[in-house]
Amino acid sequence: MKRTYYYNYMAVLMLFLIACTKKQDTPAATNNYVTVTNEQFATEGMQLSEVSTKTFENTVKCSGTIVSKPNGMANVSVPIAGVVNKIHISNGAFVQKNQALVEISGSEVIDIQRDYAEATARLKRSKSEYQRLQSLYNEKVVSEKDYIAAETDFKSAEATYKSLQLKLHAAGFSAHDIENGEFLSSYILRAPISGYASGIKATIGNYINQQTAAIEITDPTQFQLALSVFASDISGIKKGQEVRFSSQGIANQLTAVISSVGVTVNFDTKSIDCYAIIKVENGTQPIANNVVTAEIITQSAPVNAVPTEALIKSETNYFLLVLHQKTESGYQFNKIMVEIGRQQNGFTEIKNATISEQIVSKGVYNISL
């Protein structure tokens, strides 16, 4: 019986000693101080640092699409209908402004040159007759009726001449050469802007008219963001604000700048259209019509911040361990209650405290206050 009592006593004593040993491995909190031994500091992977100043942002999240500016896309059609003789480019090729795209020939090409040559001759005759009758009319030699008829014929001839001249210029013909009887059997359709060619509908031997877009050209330097912002957020959006966005097919996040803010709500989406100019960086090329997720930076300011993992939560309050003194055997910290604000990129804003001493910035997970 005595032996059993002895064993029970020894077992209880050992459990008590083990419990005491474990307690020594946990940093001890006394009133407003927390004591940490050198061994505990190393075991918990603790680190000391200072409260830093970080730039925190207020942002508005939205979605949108990469679109072209009005002058950044062209649907190229022929000014004079005809048959496709030759195609100088292929889909996906980059073309410079005024570069040859397609060669067009056919009876319409010949006819318009003939019509212009005839219009030139008619204009010369009608002008000469108009000037002759004008002089006679001023001398009361001819009637007003004859004078008006000559004037009408001259203005009609002039209108026909100028309209045909504009069509020839659009096709790249030299009006001067045609007036001198030098006709061409074909003309070259040229690129109105620089960019990438796509949607080529021209086929050698096929007839193509003015209503058909032969080629589409897109200038990637003219891309912009079309963003849909909820009406409740629009008051914070201003021209010149920075936008960060990402989309499929682009590895890195890109930036843009708000260029215009809409004033009309889209009844279907309940949002307002805003536009932003894209900044192309490191050769990254946005993709037209790609959907993007974006955030507009409406405000940014420097604030006091600490690593989020430096905070100790106790019930509804948050604390920091601020270095009070370093001793030979370890560290003594003040536990300071703080009011936290926004969280961003692993840091948390500290709103109510100015702390110049070092804090424990890492390794506080096992500390109980």
Image: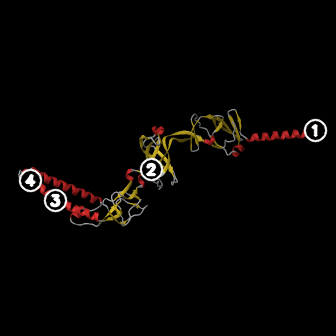
**Type of the residue with mark 1:** Lys
Residue annotated with mark 4: 135
**Which image quadrant is residue 338 in?**
top right
Q: Amino acid at mark 2?
A: Ile
The mark closer to the camera, 2 or 1, is 2
Look at mark 3 in the image and give the residue it sits on: 124
For the residue pair 225 and 259, the one nearer the viewer reads as 225
Give the percent coordinates (x, y) of residue 71: 37, 52
* Residue 111 circle label: none
The residue wearing badge 1 is: 2
Q: In front: 312, or 253?
A: 253
Q: Position of residue 131 (x, y in %)?
A: 12, 55
Secondary structure beneath disc 4? Answer: helix
> Do the residues under discs 2 and 1 have CB atoms within 8 angstroms?
no
Labels 4 and 3 touching (C-beta < 8 A):
no
Classed neighbour count for the residue bearing mark 2: other residues with Cα under 10 Å, few (<14), some (14–19), many (≥20): many
Say left or right for 340 vs 66: right
**97 left or right, relative to 151:** right
- Say which of marks 3 and 1 sits in front: 3
Q: Secondary structure at mark 1?
A: helix
The CA distance from mark 2 to mark 4 is 64 Å
The residue wearing badge 2 is: 278
The answer to whether residue 49 shows anywhere in this view is: no
From the top left corner, tell me how far across and down residue 343 is, in percent.
57, 41
